[in-house]
Image (cartoon, rainbow, N blue to C red):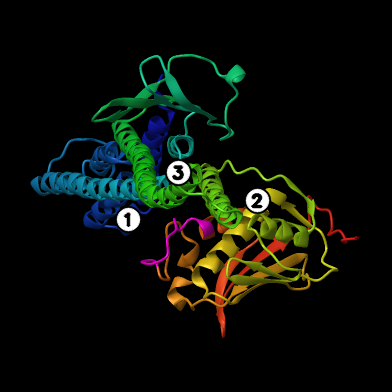
Amino acid sequence: MKNYLPLVRQYVLALLVTFSVTGFLYFFQLAFNLSIVALIYLLPVGLSTGLWGLGPGIMASLLAFLSLNYFFIQPYYSLMVHQPQDLLALLVFLIVAVVINQLVGRVSRSLELATEREREAIRLYELSKILAGATSDQAIIHGLAEQVVVTFQVERAEVVLKESESLVTDLVRLDGKTGQLAQLADWQEDRPDLLVPLQTQRGLMGEIRLWRPNYPFTGDEERLLNTFAAQGVLALERTRFSAAENRAQILEESDRLKTALLSSVSHELRTPLATIKASVSSLHSNEVDWDSESRDELLAVIEEETDHLNLLVGNLLNMSRLEVGALTLQRKWNVLPEIVASVARRMHASGAAPRLKIKSHYIQIDLPDDLPLVPVDYFLMEQVFANLISNSLKYSPEGTVITISALQPRADKLQVQVHNQGPRVAEEHLERIFDQFIRVTAAERITGTGLGLSICKGIIEAHGGQIWAENLEDGLAFNFTLPLELEGAPPRVNVE
């Protein structure tokens, strides 16, 4: 039921103001002539219209007109008018009072409208600022519900997202008194006082449900609510379009990587397979009587190419795990020199430590005996050293030395360096050297997939370390750090 008390109060106040002015003028009527009295009576007319609106202003105009006639125009205490000039004065007063009432009322309405538009603009700005920072459907409808509660002073608000008429995908319920999320058990399922649809060109996305039984919604409020709903729909569509665009970009990038991978790997696999096939066919041939030295050479070729294939397949498997975030570390305390020695053995190193020979290169292992244990995944760290050594073998001249060294630990981190005497890399390429399928040096004459260094980066970062390349005076060095703490446990001392 509509509350008329504020309206009645406005009319009563207009009456009191007019009566007060009448009492004042009656008390001092000998001091003022009729024109002054008429002018003073315009004050309650303008005041009533400006403060309480057109209705109270019109009533004040009529009351002032009657009071002027009754108390201040002869014959007194009568509404009769004997003199034509008095009648003209009364008519002019009434016209002026009504005109002033309309002008003041128009100005008041314009001021109220401007104030209301300013308030709406502020609310829309606050809503747009909240929605602009929201990145999920839940955040958007929660922000929309909060602004509706604050702006329209509702008892309860509910914003619902739907896939169909019966399938609700997301829901936010706010208590207007506390501004907090309402508990389902405390929510009375009654019919909302106003329902605003979240409508798109593709159909109904959801709706805003509001409860405010004591004060019905005005036309202006419903218009503003529809604007709120439109802003919410735009934000929801923006997040969904953004998610769709991200998925499309990921699929496009995945397709590009798969194409590049197939193109690179097909050639990289074909070469060792052809070598193995040729060596095995030669060994099976009955036309040639191989001596033991030649046979050993062919078997060594088969073993070397098999190891190369094994390294390639390991890189591919680790890359796929890194791509999907499924690389699981089995971190345990390990001895770093043992990992390096294991890699050297698998790469068929010969000679005595610390100087080993692999193919036509020399491996210098310069690892201090007092290095602490490192909490790493043994097999993945083998992969890191194998990739770094393999890269150094490819790009450094024959007969040069590849040095593996480590600095004394600082700040619970150990820094390891693999240094080769290969060509320097342009400074702008040092960061890109660890990207997938990137080969910045002699790419036209040295085969490879361009995955080895990117696998190293993924494994090192999964351990919580960093890896980078730097140019030295006599070649190129790969540096990486490894944390020496495991689940809060301090570094352990290597006791042999």
Q: Residues within 10 Å of mark 3 (few under 14, many from 20)?
A: some
Amino acid carrying label 3: it is: Thr
Query: Callout 1: helix, strand or loop?
Result: helix
Q: Of the residues shown, which amino acid type is indicated by label 2?
A: Leu
* Mark 3 and mark 2: Cα distance apart in space: 37 Å
Characterize the magenta stretch by its predominant secondary structure: loop
Residue pointed to by mark 1 = 30
Residue under label 3: 135
Query: Which residues lie in the magenta part?
Result: 443-452
Place of residue 353 in the rendered image (x, y in percent of width and height, measured from the top left): 76, 69
Asked whether residue 212 appears in the rendered view, the answer is no
Say if mark 2 contacts mark 1, CB within 8 Å. Answer: no
- Identify the residue at horizontal 58%, vertical 70% (top origin): 360
Picture quadrant of residue 75: top left
Q: Is residue 251 left or right of residue 142?
A: left
Instruction: Say what amino acid the circle numbered 1 marks.
Output: Leu
